[in-house]
């Protein structure tokens, strides 16, 4: 009985520590069909003078996160909110292991305001490059 209580206490402490470290992402990026890849992506809407606002592509959001990691900010969680709409892509969007987050700094791509997002058609040359890759379903979040 005493060993079970100690095990339960240790397991509970570990779970609480993991949950505390996984809190809200430190950086939020926004992608919208009317965005601009020269902007920061840190605003959900374009500002009044149209000098900053959402990014225009998922590829640019991915590259912003890669640049942040290259600058040594690997412990920053990121959430990328994607507005519904049509996104034209000239080449396939490729994610590699370097694009992964961690338990302490998750990287999450999500629909903006719970709107549905999805491809109208599969891009030419589309393929998963990792056997461990899997689609994320609404219940996984």
Image (cartoon, rainbow, N blue to C red):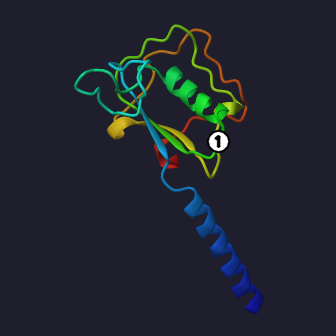
- Give residue 48's quadrant in the image: top left
The residue at the point 41 percent across, 29 percent down is 41
Q: Residues within 10 Å of mark 1 (few under 14, many from 20)?
A: some
The residue at the point 39 percent across, 18 percent down is 36
- Is residue 49 shown above or below 135? above
- Is residue 77 shown above or below 19? above
- Is residue 28 shown above or below 118? below
Between 38 and 91, the one nearer to me in the picture? 38
Between 19 and 85, the one nearer to me in the picture? 19
The residue at the point 74 percent across, 92 percent down is 2
Left or right? Give the position of 65 relative to 11.
left
Left or right? Give the position of 57 relative to 75.
left
Label 1 sits on residue: 74
In this view, the residue farthest toward the bottom is 2
Label 1 sits on a secondary structure element that is loop
Between 84 and 33, the one nearer to me in the picture? 33
The residue at the point 41 percent across, 23 percent down is 55
- Is residue 37 shown above or below 124? below
Image quarter where the N terminus lies is bottom right
State whether residue 62 appears in this view. Answer: yes
Residue 43 image offset from top left, x and y in percent? 35, 33
- Give residue 111's quadrant in the image: top left
Residue 130 image offset from top left, x and y in percent? 72, 29
Left or right? Give the position of 111 relative to 130.
left
Residue 96 image offset from top left, x and y in percent? 68, 27
State whether residue 1 appears in this view. Answer: no
Between 129 and 104, the one nearer to me in the picture? 104
In this view, the residue farthest toward the right is 3
């Amino acid at each position: 009985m005493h060993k079970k209580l100690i095990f339960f206490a240790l397991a509970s402490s570990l779970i609480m520590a993991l949950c505390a470290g996984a809190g809200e992402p430190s950086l939020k990026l926004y992608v919208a069909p009317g965005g601009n890849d020269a902007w920061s992506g840190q605003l959900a809407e374009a500002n009044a003078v149209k000098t900053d606002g959402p990014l225009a592509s998922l590829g640019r959001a991915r590259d912003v996160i890669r640049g942040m990691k290259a600058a040594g900010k690997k412990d920053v969680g990121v959430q990328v909110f994607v507005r519904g709409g049509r996104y034209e892509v000239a080449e396939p969007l490729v994610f590699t292991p370097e694009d992964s987050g961690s338990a302490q700094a998750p990287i999450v791509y999500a629909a903006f305001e719970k709107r549905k997002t999805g491809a109208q058609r599969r891009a030419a040359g589309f393929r998963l490059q990792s056997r461990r890759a899997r689609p994320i379903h609404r219940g996984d979040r």
